[in-house]
Amino acid sequence: MTRAARRRLLVAAGAAPFLALAGAHAQSVRRAVSVGGAVTEIVYAVGAGSTLVGADSTSTFPAPAEKLPRVGYMRQLSAEGVLALKPDLLVATAEAGPPAVLTQIESTGVAVKRLAVRHSVESLRENVREVAGLFGAVEGGRRVIAEIDAQWGKARARVAAATGRPRVLFVLAHGGGAPMAAGDGTAAESMIAYAGGVNAVQGMQGYKPLTAEAALAAAPDFILITQQGLDEAGGIDRLLARPGLALTPAGRARRVVAMDALVLLGFGPRMPSAVLDLATRLHG
């Protein structure tokens, strides 16, 4: 086999995962609704943003996404709101719902695709492949994955060069309610680990109320929060005024790291650069 023939074979093999997903439906997608900020980012990133006629309230990036008609919050969708946009495809995160609403939408003939939520770089790559296949954007998908891999390499190199693993407490402070701490199985835990830190809250699944006792027991070196959450909390001073936080190592040193919610927790195309940013802040 000649070198040129081998190259054509390798190229074809690399495209296979995309082509397997790009069937007749990909050619028929004219009007799509995207649910989930990371999903919407992927649709735009692979070059299919022009097909979107609506999105949910978490879809705030890139800028054109903010101008799309809204179909509500991703966990509280309205079938009427989606169907009014006359889509032929609804692509959503697996966290979208309620399930009965998605079933109702699907029963009208609208194709519904749910993407996995596994908080990993492998899942991110898989979701890019699936979206690229759905919209027939093979080359766009391959380009986005190449960009993800390049940035991921930089992030891993930064973490490998770090010394020590700081304890990080993620505080969820949205909606004006009591703050919550992130435990096992959360996007925050995955990001902390990827950035070379240790989740300061162990032995707890999901998000639980953050008590003063729990904050002191966690003894974090850093407090991690979304920028939106920090703004709602009233800034660093008011955040650290919450029971227990000021007396932690992070609180005494005022080591608070704030990042955009969609960038930090969305696990979209910007996830590798978010890991690099977080690692740099944690390790100096």
Image (cartoon, rainbow, N blue to C red):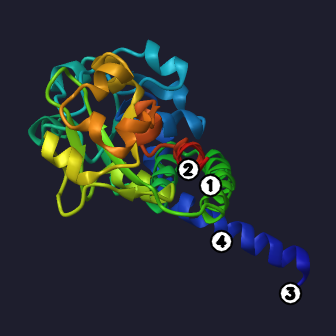
In front: 281, or 277? Answer: 281
Which quadrant of the figure has residue 245?
A: top left
Report the disc number at residue 1. 3
Residue situated furthest left in the rendering:
100
> Can you identify the residue that label 2 sits on?
279
Q: Secondary structure at mark 1?
A: helix
Q: Residue 159, how many percent across, how many down? A: 59, 60
Label 3 environment density (alpha carbons within 10 Å; few <14, some 14–19, many ≥20): few
Residue 261 in percent (x, y) is at 40, 32
**What distance separates the C-alpha of mark 2 from that of mark 1?**
8 Å
Mark 1 or 4, closer to the camera:
1
Mark 1 or mark 4, which has the lower sequence index?
Answer: 4
Q: Is residue 32 visible?
A: no
Vertical arrangement, residue 121 with respect to residue 34, above or below: below
Of the residues under marks 4 and 3, which one precedes in the sequence? 3
Left or right position of 149 against 123: right
| Label located before the other in sequence (2 or 1) | 1
Nearer the observer, 47 or 168: 168
Mark 1–mark 3 CB contact (< 8 Å): no
